[in-house]
Protein backbone atom coordinates (compact mmCIF):
# COMPACT_ATOMS: atom_id res chain seq x y z
CA UNK A 1 0.00 0.00 0.00
CA UNK A 2 1.50 3.37 -0.97
CA UNK A 3 1.89 6.14 1.61
CA UNK A 4 -0.97 8.31 0.32
CA UNK A 5 -3.39 5.38 0.21
CA UNK A 6 -2.36 4.37 3.71
CA UNK A 7 -3.17 7.86 5.01
CA UNK A 8 -6.59 7.75 3.34
CA UNK A 9 -7.32 4.34 4.89
CA UNK A 10 -6.30 5.56 8.35
CA UNK A 11 -8.47 8.68 8.03
CA UNK A 12 -11.49 6.68 6.91
CA UNK A 13 -11.02 4.26 9.80
CA UNK A 14 -11.04 7.14 12.31
CA UNK A 15 -14.21 8.54 10.75
CA UNK A 16 -15.94 5.14 10.68
CA UNK A 17 -15.29 4.64 14.41
CA UNK A 18 -16.58 8.05 15.54
CA UNK A 19 -20.36 8.57 15.50
CA UNK A 20 -20.12 12.32 16.11
CA UNK A 21 -17.84 12.79 13.10
CA UNK A 22 -20.16 10.69 10.91
CA UNK A 23 -23.21 12.75 11.91
CA UNK A 24 -21.29 15.96 11.22
CA UNK A 25 -20.26 14.75 7.77
CA UNK A 26 -23.79 13.69 6.85
CA UNK A 27 -25.03 17.16 7.78
CA UNK A 28 -22.33 18.96 5.77
CA UNK A 29 -22.61 18.04 2.06
CA UNK A 30 -19.25 19.55 0.93
CA UNK A 31 -17.30 17.58 3.53
CA UNK A 32 -19.38 14.47 2.91
CA UNK A 33 -18.72 14.64 -0.83
CA UNK A 34 -14.96 14.92 -0.26
CA UNK A 35 -14.89 11.91 2.06
CA UNK A 36 -17.17 9.92 -0.24
CA UNK A 37 -14.88 10.54 -3.22
CA UNK A 38 -11.96 9.07 -1.26
CA UNK A 39 -14.02 6.19 0.12
CA UNK A 40 -15.47 5.13 -3.23
CA UNK A 41 -12.34 3.19 -4.16
CA UNK A 42 -13.10 0.84 -1.27
CA UNK A 43 -16.86 0.56 -1.93
CA UNK A 44 -18.39 -1.93 -4.33
CA UNK A 45 -21.13 0.50 -5.30
CA UNK A 46 -23.71 2.94 -3.96
CA UNK A 47 -26.53 0.69 -5.21
CA UNK A 48 -27.03 -3.06 -5.15
CA UNK A 49 -26.74 -3.28 -8.93
CA UNK A 50 -23.45 -1.34 -8.89
CA UNK A 51 -22.17 -3.65 -6.20
CA UNK A 52 -22.90 -6.73 -8.29
CA UNK A 53 -21.29 -5.14 -11.34
CA UNK A 54 -18.12 -4.78 -9.28
CA UNK A 55 -18.56 -8.35 -8.04
CA UNK A 56 -18.61 -9.69 -11.59
CA UNK A 57 -14.99 -8.60 -12.02
CA UNK A 58 -14.08 -10.39 -8.81
CA UNK A 59 -15.87 -13.56 -9.85
CA UNK A 60 -13.94 -13.50 -13.13
CA UNK A 61 -10.74 -13.78 -11.06
CA UNK A 62 -12.07 -16.90 -9.36
CA UNK A 63 -12.99 -15.28 -6.05
CA UNK A 64 -16.17 -15.27 -4.02
CA UNK A 65 -17.40 -12.10 -2.33
CA UNK A 66 -19.32 -10.89 0.68
CA UNK A 67 -21.77 -8.00 0.58
CA UNK A 68 -22.26 -5.45 3.35
CA UNK A 69 -24.94 -2.77 3.34
CA UNK A 70 -22.71 -0.43 5.30
CA UNK A 71 -23.84 1.19 8.50
CA UNK A 72 -24.04 0.76 12.26
CA UNK A 73 -25.49 2.28 15.43
CA UNK A 74 -29.06 2.59 14.18
CA UNK A 75 -30.98 4.59 16.78
CA UNK A 76 -34.63 4.12 15.78
CA UNK A 77 -36.75 1.05 15.11
CA UNK A 78 -38.05 2.30 11.76
CA UNK A 79 -34.52 2.61 10.34
CA UNK A 80 -33.60 -0.84 11.70
CA UNK A 81 -36.54 -2.33 9.80
CA UNK A 82 -35.51 -0.52 6.61
CA UNK A 83 -31.98 -1.90 7.00
CA UNK A 84 -33.35 -5.41 7.50
CA UNK A 85 -35.44 -5.11 4.34
CA UNK A 86 -32.37 -3.97 2.41
CA UNK A 87 -30.41 -7.00 3.54
CA UNK A 88 -33.34 -9.19 2.49
CA UNK A 89 -33.02 -7.60 -0.96
CA UNK A 90 -29.34 -8.51 -0.98
CA UNK A 91 -30.17 -12.12 -0.15
CA UNK A 92 -32.74 -12.21 -2.96
CA UNK A 93 -30.18 -10.77 -5.38
CA UNK A 94 -27.59 -13.38 -4.46
CA UNK A 95 -30.17 -16.15 -4.83
CA UNK A 96 -31.39 -14.80 -8.18
CA UNK A 97 -27.91 -14.48 -9.65
CA UNK A 98 -26.63 -17.74 -8.08
CA UNK A 99 -23.54 -15.77 -7.06
CA UNK A 100 -20.90 -17.31 -4.82
CA UNK A 101 -21.51 -14.74 -2.11
CA UNK A 102 -22.24 -14.22 1.56
CA UNK A 103 -23.50 -11.34 3.69
CA UNK A 104 -21.63 -9.36 6.33
CA UNK A 105 -23.44 -7.12 8.83
CA UNK A 106 -23.27 -5.21 12.11
CA UNK A 107 -25.87 -6.09 14.72
CA UNK A 108 -26.07 -2.43 15.79
CA UNK A 109 -27.22 -1.70 12.23
CA UNK A 110 -30.18 -4.00 12.89
CA UNK A 111 -31.17 -2.21 16.10
CA UNK A 112 -28.98 -3.65 18.86
CA UNK A 113 -28.43 -0.18 20.38
CA UNK A 114 -32.20 0.28 20.66
CA UNK A 115 -33.21 -3.16 21.91
CA UNK A 116 -31.31 -6.45 21.83
CA UNK A 117 -34.53 -8.35 21.18
CA UNK A 118 -35.20 -6.16 18.15
CA UNK A 119 -31.75 -6.94 16.77
CA UNK A 120 -32.29 -10.65 17.44
CA UNK A 121 -35.63 -10.56 15.65
CA UNK A 122 -34.20 -8.79 12.61
CA UNK A 123 -31.09 -10.97 12.49
CA UNK A 124 -33.26 -14.10 12.75
CA UNK A 125 -35.33 -12.98 9.74
CA UNK A 126 -32.15 -12.60 7.72
CA UNK A 127 -30.66 -15.87 8.95
CA UNK A 128 -33.82 -17.79 8.08
CA UNK A 129 -34.07 -16.28 4.60
CA UNK A 130 -30.36 -16.82 3.99
CA UNK A 131 -30.53 -20.43 5.20
CA UNK A 132 -33.40 -21.16 2.82
CA UNK A 133 -31.24 -19.77 0.01
CA UNK A 134 -28.04 -21.56 1.04
CA UNK A 135 -26.33 -18.29 1.96
CA UNK A 136 -24.01 -17.60 4.86
CA UNK A 137 -24.19 -14.53 7.12
CA UNK A 138 -21.16 -13.19 8.94
CA UNK A 139 -21.64 -10.96 11.98
CA UNK A 140 -18.97 -8.27 12.22
CA UNK A 141 -17.41 -7.12 15.47
CA UNK A 142 -17.76 -3.54 16.76
CA UNK A 143 -16.37 -1.52 19.69
CA UNK A 144 -15.52 -3.27 22.95
CA UNK A 145 -18.55 -1.76 24.70
CA UNK A 146 -20.68 -3.93 22.39
CA UNK A 147 -18.73 -7.18 22.41
CA UNK A 148 -20.75 -8.92 25.15
CA UNK A 149 -24.05 -8.08 23.47
CA UNK A 150 -22.83 -9.22 20.04
CA UNK A 151 -21.52 -12.54 21.32
CA UNK A 152 -24.64 -13.08 23.41
CA UNK A 153 -26.90 -12.50 20.42
CA UNK A 154 -24.74 -14.73 18.25
CA UNK A 155 -25.03 -17.54 20.78
CA UNK A 156 -28.82 -17.24 20.65
CA UNK A 157 -28.82 -17.23 16.85
CA UNK A 158 -26.71 -20.39 16.81
CA UNK A 159 -29.43 -22.26 18.71
CA UNK A 160 -31.58 -22.01 15.57
CA UNK A 161 -29.19 -21.44 12.69
CA UNK A 162 -25.94 -22.98 11.47
CA UNK A 163 -25.25 -20.37 8.78
CA UNK A 164 -24.35 -17.38 10.98
CA UNK A 165 -20.65 -16.85 11.57
CA UNK A 166 -18.93 -14.56 14.08
CA UNK A 167 -15.96 -12.19 13.94
CA UNK A 168 -13.31 -12.13 16.69
CA UNK A 169 -10.59 -9.53 17.22
CA UNK A 170 -7.11 -10.87 17.92
CA UNK A 171 -5.87 -7.84 19.87
CA UNK A 172 -8.35 -8.20 22.73
CA UNK A 173 -7.30 -10.07 25.87
CA UNK A 174 -10.77 -11.58 26.15
CA UNK A 175 -10.53 -13.24 22.73
CA UNK A 176 -8.81 -16.35 24.10
CA UNK A 177 -11.91 -17.19 26.14
CA UNK A 178 -14.32 -16.01 23.43
CA UNK A 179 -12.57 -18.21 20.88
CA UNK A 180 -12.88 -21.32 23.03
CA UNK A 181 -16.63 -20.72 23.25
CA UNK A 182 -16.97 -19.97 19.53
CA UNK A 183 -15.14 -23.17 18.61
CA UNK A 184 -17.95 -25.14 20.27
CA UNK A 185 -20.39 -23.79 17.68
CA UNK A 186 -20.45 -25.33 14.17
CA UNK A 187 -20.28 -21.97 12.38
CA UNK A 188 -17.53 -20.02 10.67
CA UNK A 189 -15.14 -17.88 12.68
CA UNK A 190 -13.70 -14.79 11.05
CA UNK A 191 -10.49 -13.63 12.70
CA UNK A 192 -9.39 -10.00 12.34
CA UNK A 193 -6.59 -8.10 14.06
CA UNK A 194 -8.93 -5.37 15.35
CA UNK A 195 -9.43 -1.80 14.18
CA UNK A 196 -11.04 0.04 17.09
CA UNK A 197 -9.11 2.12 19.60
CA UNK A 198 -8.91 0.28 22.92
CA UNK A 199 -7.38 0.84 26.34
CA UNK A 200 -4.29 -0.96 27.63
CA UNK A 201 -6.54 -2.85 30.02
CA UNK A 202 -8.60 -4.23 27.13
CA UNK A 203 -5.97 -5.49 24.79
CA UNK A 204 -2.70 -5.38 22.92
CA UNK A 205 -1.20 -2.49 20.94
CA UNK A 206 -1.17 -2.74 17.16
CA UNK A 207 2.01 -4.30 15.85
CA UNK A 208 4.06 -7.34 16.78
CA UNK A 209 2.10 -8.33 19.87
CA UNK A 210 -1.20 -8.29 18.01
CA UNK A 211 0.38 -10.17 15.10
CA UNK A 212 1.63 -12.83 17.53
CA UNK A 213 -1.83 -13.16 19.06
CA UNK A 214 -3.36 -13.48 15.60
CA UNK A 215 -0.96 -16.32 14.72
CA UNK A 216 -1.70 -18.07 17.99
CA UNK A 217 -5.48 -18.00 17.50
CA UNK A 218 -5.19 -18.79 13.80
CA UNK A 219 -3.15 -21.90 14.52
CA UNK A 220 -5.66 -23.03 17.14
CA UNK A 221 -8.61 -22.66 14.75
CA UNK A 222 -6.79 -24.35 11.88
CA UNK A 223 -5.72 -27.33 13.97
CA UNK A 224 -9.35 -27.79 15.06
CA UNK A 225 -10.30 -28.02 11.35
CA UNK A 226 -13.00 -25.45 12.06
CA UNK A 227 -14.73 -23.32 9.43
CA UNK A 228 -12.46 -20.31 9.24
CA UNK A 229 -12.07 -16.96 7.51
CA UNK A 230 -8.54 -15.57 7.73
CA UNK A 231 -9.35 -11.88 7.40
CA UNK A 232 -6.07 -10.07 6.95
CA UNK A 233 -3.86 -8.46 4.32
CA UNK A 234 -0.71 -9.34 6.24
CA UNK A 235 1.36 -11.43 3.84
CA UNK A 236 3.58 -12.86 6.58
CA UNK A 237 0.54 -14.14 8.46
CA UNK A 238 -0.87 -15.60 5.26
CA UNK A 239 2.43 -17.43 4.66
CA UNK A 240 2.24 -18.76 8.21
CA UNK A 241 -1.28 -20.02 7.55
CA UNK A 242 -0.16 -21.77 4.39
CA UNK A 243 2.66 -23.51 6.26
CA UNK A 244 0.33 -24.67 9.05
CA UNK A 245 -2.19 -25.99 6.52
CA UNK A 246 0.47 -28.01 4.70
CA UNK A 247 2.22 -29.23 7.84
CA UNK A 248 -0.97 -30.56 9.44
CA UNK A 249 -2.71 -31.66 6.21
CA UNK A 250 -5.69 -29.41 6.95
CA UNK A 251 -8.66 -29.52 4.59
CA UNK A 252 -8.53 -26.17 2.77
CA UNK A 253 -12.24 -26.42 1.89
CA UNK A 254 -12.93 -25.17 5.42
CA UNK A 255 -10.74 -22.10 4.98
CA UNK A 256 -11.12 -18.72 3.34
CA UNK A 257 -8.82 -15.73 3.00
CA UNK A 258 -10.83 -12.52 3.19
CA UNK A 259 -9.64 -9.13 1.96
CA UNK A 260 -11.24 -5.72 1.59
CA UNK A 261 -12.01 -4.24 -1.80
CA UNK A 262 -9.07 -2.30 -3.27
CA UNK A 263 -6.84 -2.70 -0.22
CA UNK A 264 -5.67 -5.79 -2.04
CA UNK A 265 -7.93 -7.22 -4.72
CA UNK A 266 -11.58 -7.86 -4.11
CA UNK A 267 -14.79 -6.48 -2.62
CA UNK A 268 -14.50 -7.75 0.89
CA UNK A 269 -13.47 -10.83 -1.04
CA UNK A 270 -12.42 -14.21 0.11
CA UNK A 271 -10.72 -16.91 -1.87
CA UNK A 272 -10.14 -20.53 -0.92
CA UNK A 273 -6.54 -21.20 0.07
Image (spheres, rainbow, N blue to C red):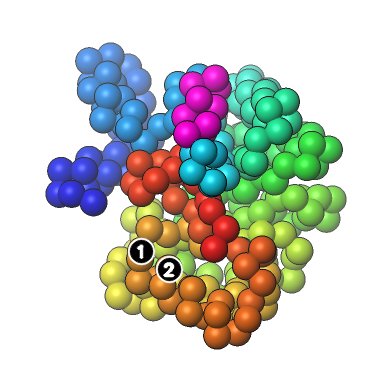
Q: Which residue is mark 2?
A: 238
Q: Position of residue 177 (x, y in %)?
A: 59, 75
Q: Examine the rendered structure and indicate whether residue 90 appears above or below residue 218.
A: above
Q: Examine the rendered structure and indicate whether residue 179 appears above or below residue 4.
A: below
Q: Residue at x 64, y 41 (%)?
A: 100
Q: Is residue 112 magenta?
A: no
Mostly what secondary structure, the magenta segment?
helix
Find out whether the residues at labels 1 and 2 contact each other: C-beta distance under 8 Å.
Answer: yes
Snapshot quadrant of residue 52? top right
Q: Position of residue 123 (x, y in %)?
A: 71, 39
Q: Quick one: 94 or 30, which is closer to the camera?
A: 94
**Does any portion of residue 21 appear in the rendered image?**
yes
Q: Which residue is mark 1?
A: 234
- Decide if residue 10 is on the left or right side of residue 160: left
Q: Residues within 10 Å of mark 2 (few under 14, many from 20)?
A: some
Q: Which residues are magenta?
A: 48-57
- Decide if residue 45 is on the left or right side of residue 89: left
Q: Examine the rendered structure and indicate whether residue 111 appears above or below residue 83.
A: below
Q: How many marks?
A: 2
Amino acid sequence: MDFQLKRVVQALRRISRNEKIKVYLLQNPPFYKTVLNEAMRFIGGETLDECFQTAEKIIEKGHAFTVDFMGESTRDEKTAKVVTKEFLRVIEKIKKTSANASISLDLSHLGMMIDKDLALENASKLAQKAKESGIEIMISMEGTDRTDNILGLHKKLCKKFDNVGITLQAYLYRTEKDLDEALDRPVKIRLVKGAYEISREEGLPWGRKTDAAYRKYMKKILKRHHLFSIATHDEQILHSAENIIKRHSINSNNIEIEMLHMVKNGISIYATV
